[in-house]
Image (cartoon, rainbow, N blue to C red):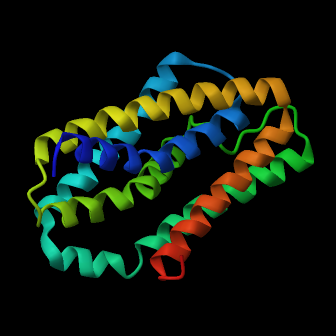
Amino acid sequence: MNILSSFVVALGLSMDNFTVTLASGCADRQVHHARTFGVSLSFMLAHILMFCAGWWGGQELGRWLDRFDHWIAFAVLAFIGFKMIKESVEQKEEPTVCRLVSVKTVAALAVATSLDALLVGMALSFTSAPFGLTLVFMAVCVFVTSYIGFFLGSMLGRRFGTIMAALGGVALVGVGTKVLLSGLGIW
């Protein structure tokens, strides 16, 4: 596995959190640099922990977690997505469900989007993949895509209003459904 392969794996692992932060930004519509930095850092740390746990955890952990990781990710993403859709339909002045200020919300989303990093770490541990390089690429990709996703979503949310919050909710439900179907071997 070469440098380009490590980068592609890292970029692929960061796409779920990009979608989640994009949707969250659409719902929040307010840019707070310190909060966005903290959320991006949380997503990055969750990915690092999961990737390292997978790399060092061995096959047994993978077989155990592989049975239900897709259900956990689906439940969290679908719950938050449906709440975002509901809030946008109710046309509240300011959506609150996906404003990433709650430690519980940030932690749930960080874990849900980083479960695949656990399994990828486990799979790569049996190859000649460069651990350190892949970890650094993943950390940088996750942080940058989270930060950009939140700001881009915030801009779209301000420009297009509640329709973007609803579309963000639909995107979260879609990502959760794709994760579930993939985990069940359907897609």
Q: Position of residue 81 (x, y in %)?
A: 69, 55
The answer to whether 132 appears left or right of 50 in the picture is left
- At a point 24% along the width and 74% down the height, the residue shown is 62
- Name the image quarter holding residue 150: top right
Q: Is residue 80 visible?
A: no
Residue 119 sits above or below residue 154 on the image: below
Q: Residue at x 53, y 73 (%)?
A: 180
Task: From the viewer's perspective, tell me whether residue 74 is left or right of residue 45.
Answer: right
> Residue 150, relative to residue 183: is it above or below?
above
- Location of residue 186 in the rendering, given as x and y in whole percent from the top left corner: 54, 82
Q: In the visual, does 79 lie left or right of 165?
A: left
Q: Position of residue 147 (x, y in %)?
A: 49, 28
Give the image quarter of residue 21: top right
In this view, the residue in front, 180 or 42, is: 180
Residue 164 point in image, percent of width and height = 79, 39
Q: Residue at x 56, y 34 (%)?
A: 101
153 up-or-down from 19: above or below: above
Q: From the viewer's perspective, is residue 21 above or below residue 55?
A: above
Q: Residue 42 is drawn in which quadrant? A: top left
Is residue 20 at least partly visible in the picture? Answer: yes
